[in-house]
Amino acid sequence: MSNKKVLGTAMIITACTFWGISGLFAKALFNVSSSITSMWLTQVRMVSAGIILVLLSQIRGKHPFQIFKDLHSAWIIFAYGVFGLVPVQYAYFMAVQYGNASIATILQFIGPFFIIAYQAMFRHLPPRRIEIISAIIAFLGVFIIATHGQFNHLAMTLSVLIWGLISAIGVATNTLIPQNMLREGRVPSLIITGWGLLFAGLTLVLIHPSQPHIPNVPSVWLYVLGILVIGTLIPFQLANNSLKYIDATTFSLMDAFEPLSATIGSVLIFHLQMTGADILGSILVIVAVLAINIRIPQKKLKSN
């Protein structure tokens, strides 16, 4: 493995680990006070990160305000923020608030299967056999986690399951909405993400303007800073830059470090008790998602 590929792999592993850790910061924040809500946290994270990324793109000479001269691009970025980033972040924090970072991240991890379903239904791209098998395995894993194998019993609250699945759907919309714009390279990814976060955050503020009473204690702002810097700004930059050195397949495979870090952190920090069913279900989900990103080289196919 070349030094550049090692660097790229290390960058994406760090990014995914940081994303997993952000869920731990969120859980710690919710534990400080019941007045701290997922809505408030999502608003603060999106507006703050959006402003920082837009300013950063301006400093780098990428001219972020040029998008307002192209209303079509501006509307796509708005849709990306509201229908992509909002569910992938707000619903995720709701699953963390009512459950824990581990289960929230595992449920969100099945997002790629909603992308496969969308492509099959609306783009007439039939899923590969490995994708069908992996989807069955992944949802079997979710079933085992949710019920511990008992049809008449939920091992988690229904709200955690619903919010977790909404966040997984958000992964799909978050990927699909800006796909063509990113592929064509018309607008830099930094600008798309920055404005998407800002549009989404401001929309949430308009929808829910009332703000809770937040305890003015150091731990609250420390956790918020951790979510903003460690859970948003640093991993975004690392993930984007890693693609200079590694291919998309390697990038996708390393994504498994997100649920792993969230689970290990939940066990070590919050003393999460994982049953055999939890471990088995989590392994099935992670293996299934990794499997759909494996591409068998064409030469091997021809030689069989």
Image: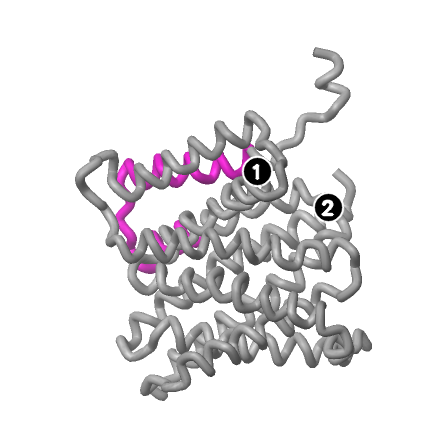
- Residue type, numbered disc 1: Ala
Q: Residues within 10 Å of mark 2 (few under 14, many from 20)?
A: some
* Residue 140 or residue 69, whichever sits in front: 69
Query: Total of numbered circles in the picture?
Result: 2
Question: Taking 209 as reference, is 200 left or right?
Answer: right
Which x, y percent locates residue 166? 41, 55
Question: Taking 90 as reference, is 228 left or right?
Answer: right
Q: Is residue 287 magenta?
A: yes
Which x, y percent locates residue 101? 38, 57
Q: What residue is at 49 percent from the left and 71 percent from the top?
A: 226
| Element type at mark 2 | loop
Q: What residue is at 46 percent from the left and 77 percent from the top?
A: 204
Give the extent of the magenta segment: 262-291
Dividing the image into 4 quarters, which one contains the C terminus? top right
Q: Which residue is mark 1?
A: 120
Disc marking residue 57:
none
Q: Residue furthest right?
A: 61
Q: Nearer the viewer, mark 1 or mark 2?
A: 1
Q: Which residue is mark 2?
A: 246
Q: Residues within 10 Å of mark 1 (few under 14, many from 20)?
A: few
Dividing the image into 4 quarters, which one contains the N terminus? top right
Q: What residue is at 36 percent from the left and 61 percent from the top?
A: 96
Q: Residue furthest top?
A: 304
Which one is earlier in the sequence, the residue at label 1 or at label 2? 1
Q: Is residue 290 above or below residue 298?
A: below
Which x, y percent locates residue 253? 59, 41
